Image (cartoon, rainbow, N blue to C red):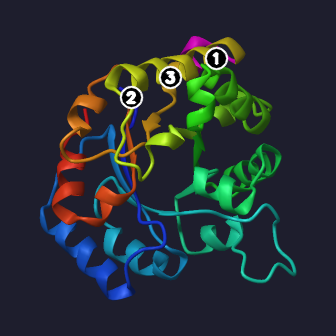
């Protein structure tokens, strides 16, 4: 079975002490994860070492950065490189989140470079893609997402593409309380898998985890995750509430 992943994205929330308390509450549950399951915590940069320390030794629990820069090193005040993340043993990095694309104007080309830098440093990219409401309303979502994948990922070898996790985010369902129906989520996940199969092959497509990232909550996670092509979720607001994220972890296939 493909890796089933519950990924928490804390975004710019919680103080250091609140983050510690949240992780402690989740870990206190002692949720036993199968070999094909992962709980990943994408925390703000100042909390990476703390989270890594708390999660180390916990089977199939891992820490993720929320971003990295598209340069190896240099005079880029305020930025964080993939090499820096590697040096503190961070295993995952979220790239191309819709908020980064919208507020910080990250392009598909810049994201392609970030993905490569992560792969070069042994870090698994969680690559986000997805359409706005205006794109969805005119029925252009499939072509829009395909372009994101083509321009950022499809120049990589089959060996490298298998190392990437994809998160589909219907942008109109992030932080709005709206959620794509299970049918809408499955339809797009299946489409993403189909275009990967077309570019590479079916085995490669079947090996890649595709997460759903649009208002996943404790009360809808199990239904969403039950879809054949949905391999877990990239979770925002609900990941800030211990009981909710515990339920979401437990909803994994």
Up-down: is 38 above or below 90?
above
Quadrant where the image shows the N terminus: top left
Up-down: is 253 above or below 176?
above
- The mark nearer the N terminus, 3 or 2, is 3
| Image location of residue 71, percent across then percent down | 82, 65
Q: Is residue 229 visible?
A: no
Dot 2 alpha-carbon crowd within 10 angstroms: few under 14, some 14 to 19, many 20 or more: many
* Magenta region, residue range: 200-204
Residues under labels 3 and 2: Cα distance?
A: 10 Å
Quarter of the image where one finds residue 232: top left
Badges 3 and 1: C-beta atoms under 8 Å apart? no
- Between disc 3 and disc 1, the foreground one is 3
Pointer 1: what residue?
A: 195
Dot 1 alpha-carbon crowd within 10 angstroms: few under 14, some 14 to 19, many 20 or more: some
Q: Is residue 234 visible?
A: yes
- The mark nearer the N terminus, 3 or 1, is 3
Q: What residue occupies the far bottom of the structure in this picture?
A: 17
| Element carrying mark 1 | helix
The total of numbered circles placed on residues is 3
Q: Which mark is residue 188?
A: 3
Residues under labels 3 and 1: Cα distance?
A: 11 Å
Observer-nearest of 75 and 186: 186
The secondary structure making up most of the magenta span is helix
Dot 3 alpha-carbon crowd within 10 angstroms: few under 14, some 14 to 19, many 20 or more: many
- Between disc 3 and disc 2, the foreground one is 3
| Residue found at x 48% / y 73% | 12
Q: Which mark is residue 230?
A: 2
Q: Is residue 184 left or right of residue 101?
A: left
| Image location of residue 19, percent across then percent down | 33, 78
Q: Is residue 126 left or right of residue 154?
A: left
Badges 2 and 1: C-beta atoms under 8 Å apart? no
Whether residue 111 is in magenta: the answer is no
């Amino acid at each position: 079975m493909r890796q089933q992943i519950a990924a928490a994205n804390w975004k710019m929330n919680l103080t250091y002490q609140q983050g510690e308390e949240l992780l402690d509450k989740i870990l206190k549950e002692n949720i036993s994860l199968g070999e094909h399951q992962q709980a990943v915590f994408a925390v703000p940069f100042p909390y990476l070492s703390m989270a890594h320390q708390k999660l180390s030794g916990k089977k199939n629990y891992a820490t993720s950065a929320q971003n990295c820069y598209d340069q190896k090193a240099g005079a880029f005040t305020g930025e964080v490189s993939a090499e820096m993340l590697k040096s503190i043993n961070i295993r995952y990095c979220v790239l191309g989140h819709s908020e980064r694309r919208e507020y910080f104007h990250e392009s598909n080309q810049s994201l392609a470079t970030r993905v490569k830098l992560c792969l070069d440093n042994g870090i698994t990219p969680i690559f986000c893609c997805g359409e706005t409401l205006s794109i969805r309303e005119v029925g252009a979502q499939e072509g829009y997402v395909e372009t994101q994948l083509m321009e950022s990922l499809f120049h990589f070898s089959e060996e490298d593409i298998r190392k990437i996790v994809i998160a589909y985010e219907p942008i109109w369902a992030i932080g709005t309380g709206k959620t794509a129906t299970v049918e809408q989520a499955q339809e797009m996940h299946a489409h993403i898998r189909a275009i990967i199969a077309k570019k590479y092959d079916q085995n490669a497509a079947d090996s890649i985890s595709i997460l759903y990232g649009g208002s996943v909550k404790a009360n809808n996670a199990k239904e969403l995750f039950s879809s054949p092509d949905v391999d877990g979720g990239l979770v925002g607001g609900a990941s800030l509430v211990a009981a909710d994220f515990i339920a979401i972890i437990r909803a994994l296939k």
